[in-house]
Amino acid sequence: MKIALTGNPNSGKTTLFNAITGRTERVGNWAGVTIEKKEGEVKKSISKGNASIIAVDLPGAYSMSPYTSEEHITSDFVKNENPDVIINIVDATNLSRSLFFSTQLLELGIPVVIALNKSDLNKKKETRINANVLSKRLGCPVVETVSIAGSNNGLEKLIFTVIESKGKTQQIPFEGLAINKTNRSAIEASDKKRYEFVKSIVLEIEQRKVSSNRQTKQDVVDRIVAHKWFGIPIFALVMWTVFSISQTYVGPIFANILAGWIDGLYRYVEGLLGQGVSPVIKTILLDGIIGGVGAVVGFLPLIMVLFFLLALLEDCGYMARVAVVMDRFFKRVGLSGKSIIPMVIGTGCSVPGIMATRMIKNDRQRRTTAMLTPFMPCGAKLPVIALFAGVFFNDAAWVGTTMYFLGIALIILGALIVVRISGEQNSRSFFIMELPEYKYPSIKRATIEMLSRAKAYILKASTIILLSNVVVQLMQTFNWQFQVVAEGAQNTSILASIASPFAILLMPLGFGVWQLAAAAITGFIAKENVVGTIAVVYSIKNFIDTDALALVGGGADVASAMGLTSVAALAYLVFNLFTPPCFAAIGAMNTEMENKKWLLGGISFQLGTGYVVAFIVYQVGTLLTTGVFGNGFLPGLIAVISIISYVVYLMRKGNQKSLAKKAVLEV
Amino acid sequence: MDNIVVIIIILAIITGAIAKVVIEKRNGNKCIGCPHGKSSDIECNCDDF
């Protein structure tokens, strides 16, 4: 038996899907989170041992006449895939809008069961809905549900009703007019009649205590939080608080405990190996595998706390307000209003963020968004931020916050440049996003999100990072004659000989040593590799305890361990954050851009941006702190001027193309 | 003998890591380490509308 879960955006479809299937698909307290269909089997505990029921979670839709790509997926599925029953999730707090879509679903002839979701919110607002009358008027069963509740959520009753409804004939309470779909006025007239029908039902079944035209407390909060000027500093303050809690106060407490365990494991295995084992084999196991992976895993608590807090912010409805605040800036620079969604998703991981760009219709806007989404610091970049903030800036929360806002600034600047280069007219796009109501965030949901991030992080550390560290360790241990490099002669290793030419290019950025160049290169496989490789090449297994770093350097100054000044460390961080994130993200860019020229342009743009910004940070920072420019200023300046000149040349070329197009149109 | 035992352990760890990567890729996971890195086989054709 196959059931389709349909409903308006943010009506709670994926939350209900997760509750009945036990899956942990991404949910969010805002519209547009689901962009693809997802399938899962309904739990036997809910279906009471009935035959297998496959639930299909579909993207939100307002109408059966698709306007967006997500609506297209939903409309295609219910029309062509013949589900046995449709569960129409109706937001009980917004009946009139939700029932418009319900009446269209009822016309398909497939049995429909209405899940009157978010019923708990209505109780709080003292709004009453007569579900029995609604059921009679629509001619289908109506079940009240609260999909976020652990018990008494109505889900068992819902699935029981669904099983009962299979094979039954569906009544059609309202039949739309047979109209010509290309005739706009006929469509509007038909929709108007449907709205009148829905309105008559709502008037009959709903009793509201709060009238919709009264300004609520939520409206007052929104006037401040989503204000065009106050919105940005409030967002900065919120992000600073999030970074303070995760990286300065709460995160390090747990990270220290975990680092102690990893250290204990290292010593235990070291003790087990004894003197009989070859030093090379010992190094691969201890420094390459346990030390390298341990250094990355050591940041797990910081990342878990950060994602827990971000999940709370999203669930309470705040992130949707951030989308509104940022939307204004993004539209002005030629991005789609929808570009904000991939970028918010990209704070978790760039790959699903880039994949989410497919909902943007305009090719140029979709490709630009896919190109710029990786500038948002993703989960893989967080250990790099945490490492440098911890080691060089005393766990200062401003480092992470600044990187977020620098990422946003680069997105805006990048979009401006791309729109000029492409020579396309800046077409205004409209993005209507319904703001969800503020609510107390669900600790359970945030915990699930945090644990799923932790599981994925450990999986990555024990696969990609582990393999990379072993390769790095082997390349550092042997020279090109496959002889073990002598103590103090690491410069002759395979790794050093490959990384050294790149290190020369990085000298004007303040980190022209082969070890850091090697870490930056392995970072293209996965950004966590930057931490893992630094751990391997400097033989550090604990980044959380900064005393360990000081010992490696042989002095009290932690920064000297890596041969970096604080300014150079910041430049290195910027370089790693704003150059291409990883091969997986590049693969996703390739899929979504569908154009090799754009892909190559995108990668070059990211490399150029990382280089130029790191150069500015290092040279200006060194000038301000020491009074003179840093090493390699002149060759670096030539390189940066060349990059900028080429970009300006492309922009001028694009501008001429745009003027030529305009002239043709005028003629 | 000690060396051989440790080499076998290292090889087992590496083989396990490679096997996991291959399984994840075959399951359609485009990004190992992203909780939402899997994509379904539905592709939107934005030119349709």
Image: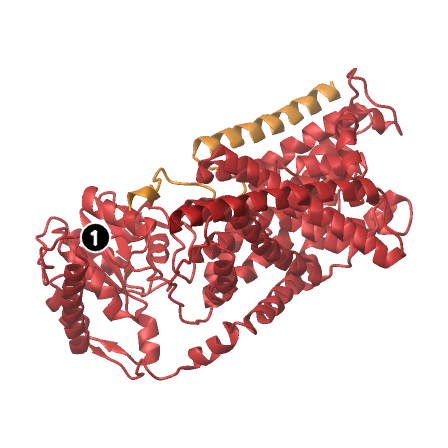
Q: Nearer the viewer, residue A256 or A27?
A: A27
For disc 1, the neighbor class at 10 Å (few under 14, some 14 to 19, many from 20) is many
Report whether residue A74 is seen.
yes
Colouring of the image: by chain
Is residue A223 rendered to the left or right of residue A379?
Answer: left
Q: Position of residue B27 (x, y in %)?
A: 43, 34
- Compared to residue A15, the image places residue A531 above or below, namely above
Is residue A177 rendered to the left or right of residue A32?
Answer: left
The kind of residue tagged 1 is: Ile
Tell me how many marks there are.
1
Question: What is chain A's hue in the picture?
Answer: red
| Residue occupying the point 46% across, 39% down | A593
Q: Nearer the viewer, residue A641 or A614?
A: A641
Q: Position of residue B20 (x, y in %)?
A: 52, 32
Q: Which residue has dot 1 on it?
A: A86
Rendered image quadrant of residue A134: bottom left
Report whether residue A573 is seen.
no
Q: Nearer the viewer, residue A279 or A587?
A: A587
- Compared to residue A19, the image places residue A133 above or below, namely below
Q: Secondary structure at mark 1?
A: strand
Q: Position of residue A542 (x, y in %)?
A: 75, 46
| Residue at far right of view | A555
| Residue at far top of view | A481
Give the chain letter at badge 1.
Answer: A
Rendered image quadrant of residue A16: bottom left
| Residue occupying the point 61% across, 64% down | A239
Is residue A128 rendered to the left or right of residue A393?
Answer: left
Q: Position of residue A194 (x, y in %)?
A: 15, 65
Q: Quadrant of the N terminus of chain A?
A: top left
| Residue occupying the point 44% across, 72% down | A438
Q: Which chain is orange?
A: B
